[in-house]
Amino acid sequence: MKFINDKQRYEGLFETKDKSGKFVLFYLSKGKGETFDISGREAAKVRKRFAFGGYTVNNAGCFINDSCTGCSDCEEICPFDCIYKEEAYVINSRYCVECGLCYKVCTQNAIELPKKM
Ligand code: SF4
Ligand code: SF4
C-alpha cells in the first residue's frame, strides 16, 4: 500500500492492489489505531496510539492510583520492567502490554486496567 498524498501522516489518499492485481484508490478520512515498535529493547514493545479525523483515543497501559502503599510487588512481577518508583510507583505506558499481572498481584486495588482504545 502506498500513501500518495502528503497532507498528513495518516489521513489521505492511498493506493493498493486487490487480489486480481488491479489498482484500488481509497481515501482515509478518520480512524484510530495502535502501533508497536518491536525493534528496540529486547522483549519490549514500544506502543503508540493515534487518532485522526476527529477521533480520540484513551491512554494505553495500566496505571497506579492513590491507593498504592508502595509494597513493590507489582514492580517485581512486571515482565517488561515498566513499573518503577518516582515519588510514588508509576507505570510506563509505552512498554506496558496490559498483561494484567500487576493488577492481579496488587492487594490494594491500586492498579487500574486501561480503558478500551
Ligand atoms: S502492588 Fe499495588 S500497593 Fe504494591 S506497589 Fe504496586 S500498586 Fe502499589
Ligand atoms: S499490565 Fe503487565 S506489562 Fe503492564 S505494567 Fe502490569 S505487569 Fe507490566
Image (spheres, helix red, strand yellow):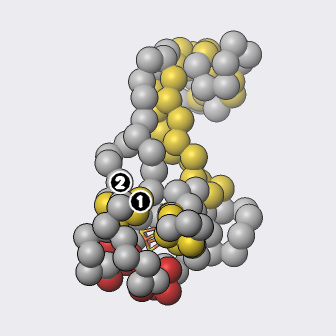
**Residue occupying image coordinates x 49% and y 69%:** 89
Kindly identify the amino acid type of the residue bearing the numbered disc 1. Phe
* Residue 73: percent from left, percent from top: 42, 85
**Res 50 visible:** yes
Relative to the observer, which residue lies in front, 48 or 14? Answer: 48
Position of residue 49 relative to residue 97, above or below, is above
**Residue occupying image coordinates x 58% and y 56%:** 94
Position of residue 62 relative to residue 84, above or below, is above
Q: Which residue is mark 2?
A: 114
- Quarter containing ligand 2? bottom left
Relative to the observer, which residue lies in front, 13 or 21? Answer: 13
**Helix, strand, or loop for circle 2?**
loop
* Residue 8: percent from left, percent from top: 67, 18
Q: Which residue is mark 1?
A: 63
Kindly identify the amino acid type of the residue bearing the numbered disc 2. Pro
* Residue 83: percent from left, percent from top: 53, 72
Q: CA distance from mark 2 to mark 1?
A: 7 Å
* Quadrant containing the N terminus in the rendered view: top right
Pointer 2 or 1: first along the chain: 1
**Residue occupying image coordinates x 73% and y 16%:** 6
Disc 2 versus disc 1: nearer the observer: 1
**Residue occupying image coordinates x 71% and y 70%:** 41
Label 2 packing within 10 angstroms: few (<14), some (14-19), many (20+): some
Relative to the observer, which residue lies in front, 18 or 92? Answer: 92
